[in-house]
Amino acid sequence: MYSGTSAFLFKISLPMKKILVIQTASTGDVILVTPLLEKLHHLYPDGVLDILIKKGNEGLFDAHPYLRQVWIWDKKMHKHRHLAGLILRIREEKYDLAINCQRFFATGLITALSKAKISSGFRKNPLSLFFSHRYPHAIGKANIHEAHRNLTLISFLGGSDDYPVRLYPSQLHEALVSQYKTRAYICIAPASLWFTKQYPERKWTEFIDALPGDLMVILLGSNADKDLCNRIGSFATHPFILNLAGKLNLLQSASLMRDARMNFVNDSAPLHLASAVNGPVAAVFCSTVPEFGFGPLSSISYTVEAKDKPTCRPCGLHGRNACPEKHFNCAHRITTEQLLQCL
């Protein structure tokens, strides 16, 4: 797995005073590296802990108690020029340890050029040859959750791997959403970046209309999800529907999800947002499967799948823009009754 030279053994004995965690993928992927932050802070409570993420996800770490700095890579504006500048600034930090949770070239380059004394990442990264520690990343085998796959990257440090996915809404975040917690409510995050990972709009409406009439239904999502949530809210006949899509930031949404009677989500970022505050969650899996390792981690959680599973499922790891078989039975065969049973 790694070199066993005496020079390397000397390196590993150095104190970990400065540590960098790298994950510049989507929101859900970033949330699933938070167990690393929990464990690293436990092992090195006096150390400096930084994280590198892509622009747009920085709100996850507002006032995070363990982080000194959040490095931000803007992938939309002058992506490569910004990357070069990041590498130069990261090299100046002289980290003791850099942990790369991605399997792609750009973050491999950051890691390899970081000047960190020790580095760790997945073997699938094309530049993993330059990492001190390299670990397998096997999806669909042994049903290992992605959060635990990430924790293997620091297994050489010893200690338990019993650390949660966790985010920290501030008192301000809590105060701003307290007005929505005056009656029993559920949250529904109906959107996904991928068509085949999104429970159909019509079926969300059917589910909402089957809910008890005194239960508040809160629709959550980003600014891009406003129209979808507006359509669902307008077609449903339930008397109490509140569309907050685009009105709350990530940590405000997390605070709301924590105290909901239940959170209904797709296999997407809101699933992990609920897990990060131990909010009760019912995760709907259409074209993907929980065995990939991205299921809910809350103490009260359900996975909802078609009982009569199509033989074509799963049709991909990340979802698709359309059903390859044209029927989308992995979603249409999930019933309202299955969702109601999660309440």
Image (tube, rainbow, N blue to C red):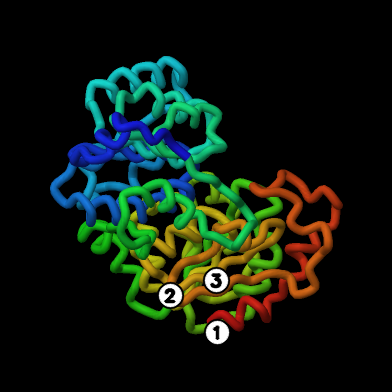
Residue 341, given in percent of the width and then of the height, sits at 60, 83
Judging by the rendered image, the residue that carries numbered circle 1 is 212
CA–CA distance in space, label 1 to label 2: 24 Å
The residue under label 3 is 282
- The answer for how far apart the CA atoms under marks 2 and 3 are is 11 Å
Q: Disc 2 on helix, strand or loop? A: loop
Residue under the image location 59 percent in, 60 percent down: 266
**Is the residue marked by circle 3 packed among few (<14), some (14-19), or many (20+) residues within 10 Å?**
many
Is residue 128 shown to the viewer in this render?
A: yes
Residue labelled with disc 2: 299
Question: As shown in the figure, which amino acid type bears the numbered disc 3?
Answer: Ala
Q: Earlier in the sequence, mark 2 or mark 3?
A: 3
Q: Is residue 313 left or right of residue 145?
A: right
For residue 283, which quarter of the picture?
Answer: bottom right
Disc with the residue nearer the chain's start (1 vs 3): 1
Look at the image and tell me whether residue 55 can be seen: no
Q: Which mark is residue 98?
A: none
Whole-percent x, y for residue 309 in the image: 78, 68
What secondary structure is marked by label 3? strand
Task: Give the secondary structure at mark 1.
Answer: loop
